[in-house]
Image (spheres, coloured by chain):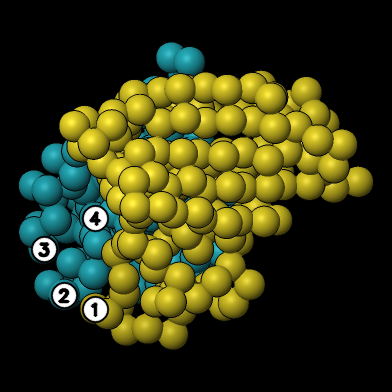
Chain colours: A cyan, B yellow
Amino acid sequence: MKSQQFQIEQKETNDSYILSLGGELDLSVVTQLRAALEPLMERTDRGLVLNLRDLKYIDSTGIGIIVSVLKYRDGINAPFSVKDIPPSIQRLFDLTGISGYLSEGTQG
Amino acid sequence: MIRLQIPSHADYIDIVRVCLYGIASKLNFSYEDIEDMKVAVSEACTNAVLHGGSEKEGGSLIDVTFQPSEAGITITVKNEGPPFEHSETEIGTGTGSPPLQGIEISELPVGGLGIYLMEALMDEVSVQSTDSSTEVILTKYVSE
């Protein structure tokens, strides 16, 4: 069970803030994820990147957060992208249609 | 029939997924089907946690049952408390086109995807509400 535990790792590169998510993203970790995102949402000096490579699980709660980040970053005209999406998660992104928004404006 | 009762709190939804995984594995569901069911059942539990009644109304527990059959499995998620908002009318059913499509980014809905995903991922979904309880019934058939 330990390996499934939700993890957030933050990194900075010259052009982006990268949050790498691992484990299971459900309702129980929403507060944790929002807290990590909050200070970065407004930063227009660099792009914001969510790396999902180690994410094992997501549902509508997590997709809702990604939608809200997408809308916010679009509203302030700042780059946002989602990278390294595992196949099982990509399938849910396709089902909901959010993938269409993630592939556009991937600069970041 | 296998029954599981969890406190109505987000921290216990993963227990339902672990339990579902064990049961569905024994029933020869494919890895993909089990992943689909994990999401659908979590959506039902998430709704129950978010919209279930207060402790006073008896909404502090969620009852989950797993009923295997020859054709597949039926999972029910039941909580006390008034029914949650049925967003079906807003975003259409699972057989339609994806809800997040052809909309301006600024107009994208942040919520309401739970019911859509349940319907897209399960073979049958029904929601039965009374004034004091809500039950979501999810069925998935084993595909050959």
Q: Are marks 3 and 2 in contact (CB under 8 Å)?
A: no
- The answer to whether the residue labelled 1 contacts the one labelled 2, judged by CB atoms less than 8 Å apart, is yes
Q: In the picture provided, is A76 more to the left or to the right than A60? A: left
- The subunit letter for the residue under badge 3 reads A
Residue type at the position of mark 4: Leu
- What secondary structure is found at the residue carrying circle 4? strand
Whether label 4 touches label 1, CB < 8 Å = no
Report whether residue A48 is seen: yes
Q: Gap between marks 1 and 2, in whole Å?
A: 7 Å
Residue depicted at 56% across the width and 39% down the height:
B76
Residue B29 appears at what percent x and percent y? 78, 36
Identify the disc placed on residue A44. 3
Q: Callout 4 environment at 10 Å: few (<14), some (14 to 19), or many (20+)?
A: many
* Residue at the spot of label 1: B106
- For the residues beneath circles 4 and 1, the answer to whether they share a chain is no
Viewer-closest of A23 and B19: B19
Precedes in sequence: disc 3 or disc 2: 3
Q: Residue at position x 37%, y 83% from top?
A: B103
Decide which of tag 2 and tag 4 comes sooner along the chain: 4
Q: Are the residues tagged 3 and 4 within 8 Å (C-beta)? A: no
* Residue type marked 2: Gly
Residue assigned mark 2: A75
Q: Quadrant of residue B31?
A: top right
**Which residue position holds label 4?**
A48
